[in-house]
Image (cartoon, grey):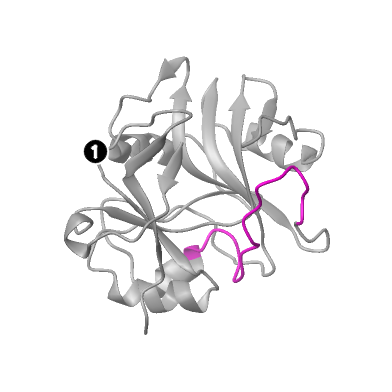
Amino acid sequence: MAAAAVRQERGRTRDSIIEPSWGGVRVLARYDGSATKLTDEDGVDCTAEFAQIAGAIAAAALAAELVLDGFLTVEPTQLGDASPIPQNETPTAGQMMTQFLVGSHVAARMNTPERHLDPDRPIAFVAVDLLSIDGSHLLDIPLLERKRLLDGALTPGELVRITPFVRPPIGSFVATWRGAGFGALAYKAPNSRYVPDSRNDAWSIMPMPPK
């Protein structure tokens, strides 16, 4: 499901949850209890290409079946703490930095099956949404509930991470995320549903606010 890549009035997004806008290769990860299949936005099976990541997702799964929406992206620095940020309290800017899920710079977004991820940099999978767990489809479940379930669906590690998110105000996080190399933010309505193959106007990508 695509976001509306447009600037919206701040009043329309004040109740949104806000995430860094990840770059890299967007994929669906389908774990069936024994193995993980990765499919990119063009429908290309890229499991063999990212076999190590597929294996890491299978090892990190805490359910018998998962369908995850996420990004394959580079991690130029190794951060010590890979555990997810608790979603019932707002982390400090320092916690957000140590909890950053994939490094200090993000690769450019790609629209073709050509992979321009730097082979000399470690690649990690960053989960941003949970679409199915143990055979229960979650597409009609509100986003915040999907986020809660996602937090308990994976054991984060070096190769498998869960995206952080915050609620407004986000002043302290803007500087942290900007310093980590992010150029945009993803705003998502907390009650939004997931509609495959559609653009969701309740989600938007906005440029990083100025200093």
Q: Is residue 166 above or below residue 54?
A: below
Q: Position of residue 144 (x, y in %)?
A: 29, 40
Q: Residue at x 74, y 58 (%)?
A: 122
Q: Residue at x 58, y 57 (%)?
A: 23
Q: Is residue 69 above or below residue 71?
A: above
Nearer to us in this view, 92 or 15: 15
Q: Is residue 106 magenta?
A: yes
Residue 143 shown left or right of residue 55 in the figure = left
Residue 204 shown left or right of residue 182 in the figure = left
Q: Which residues are magenta?
A: 99-116
Residue 134 shown left or right of residue 14 in the figure = right
Q: Is residue 37 magenta?
A: no
Q: Quadrant of residue 173?
A: bottom left
The residue where tag 1 is placed is 191
Q: Residue at x 55, y 43 (%)?
A: 70
Q: Is residue 172 above or below residue 211?
A: above
> What quarter of the picture does the C terminus occupy?
bottom left
